[in-house]
Image (cartoon, rainbow, N blue to C red):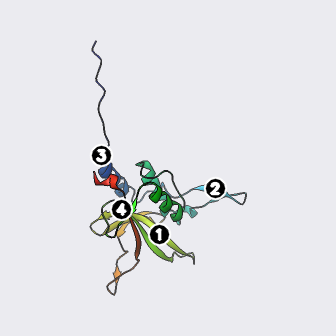
Amino acid sequence: MASKKPLDVKVVLKESYIKAIRNSVGSNLFRNLYAYVNGKKKDILEDGALSCAAFTSSILYLFKLVADIHATIRGTTADLEKSGWTKITKPREGAVLVWEAQGSGSGKAHKHIGFYIGKNKAVSNHFKKHHPILHHWTFGTKNGRPVRKVEQIFWNKKLNK
């Protein structure tokens, strides 16, 4: 009996990555992460209110575009830089966006992180809905200015293929 030749399968990175981002909209997968804080177990993502970095880094980790999953924007951006992501000035489909700090309802100002998916659209975790949503990449405009300014845009050349 002749042996079968193994299939040569290669993941189409950018298309699969963009589809995973789009398909994450409405998912509760990124809502909770438990850690011991001062000896007490705590959901450090506050049931999805603080899940933007965990969501973003999880998708990036799934596609081997960062080294680990992170609960903070600082940790995620540090990993982006170590993993070969560079800063660009105009968003491209698949780019990672970091928005300026704004209040999130908890009284504290927080930066925000998510993905640009093209046509002025982004996907990021919504602090009130507690899951990823599709939205305008600057959360819209008011008086001709972005509602939320994008401070950093990261790109990885692996997405060029």
Please state which of residues 37 and 152 is positioned toward the viewer in this rendering.
Answer: 152
Q: Which amino acid is tagged 2?
A: Ala
Q: Is residue 142 above or below residue 75?
A: below
Q: Is the C-beta separation of discs 2 and 1 under 8 Å?
A: no
150 to the left or right of 75: left
Question: Badge 1 is on which residue?
Answer: 112
Question: Badge 2 is on which residue?
Answer: 35
Q: Is residue 106 above or below residue 4?
A: below
Q: Which one is earlier in the sequence, the residue at label 2 or at label 4?
A: 2
Q: Residue at point 50% right, 60% down?
A: 78
Question: Badge 4 is on which residue?
Answer: 95
Kindly report which numbered mark, 2 or 3, lies closer to the viewer in this rendering: 3
Instruction: Find the distance from the CA under tag 1 to the CA under tag 4.
Output: 14 Å
Q: Which amino acid is tagged 4?
A: Ala
Q: Secondary structure at mark 1?
A: strand
Q: Give coordinates of residue 128: x percent, y percent.
A: 49, 70
Q: Is the C-beta separation of discs 2 and 4 under 8 Å?
A: no
Q: Which one is earlier in the sequence, the residue at label 2 or at label 3?
A: 3
Q: Is the C-beta separation of discs 1 and 3 under 8 Å?
A: no
Question: Badge 3 is on which residue?
Answer: 12
Q: Give coordinates of residue 92: x percent, y percent.
A: 30, 63
Q: Give coordinates of residue 47: x percent, y percent.
A: 55, 62
Corner quadrant of residue 125: bottom left
Q: Give coordinates of residue 37: x percent, y percent.
A: 68, 60
Instruction: Find the distance from the CA under tag 2 to the CA under tag 1.
Output: 21 Å
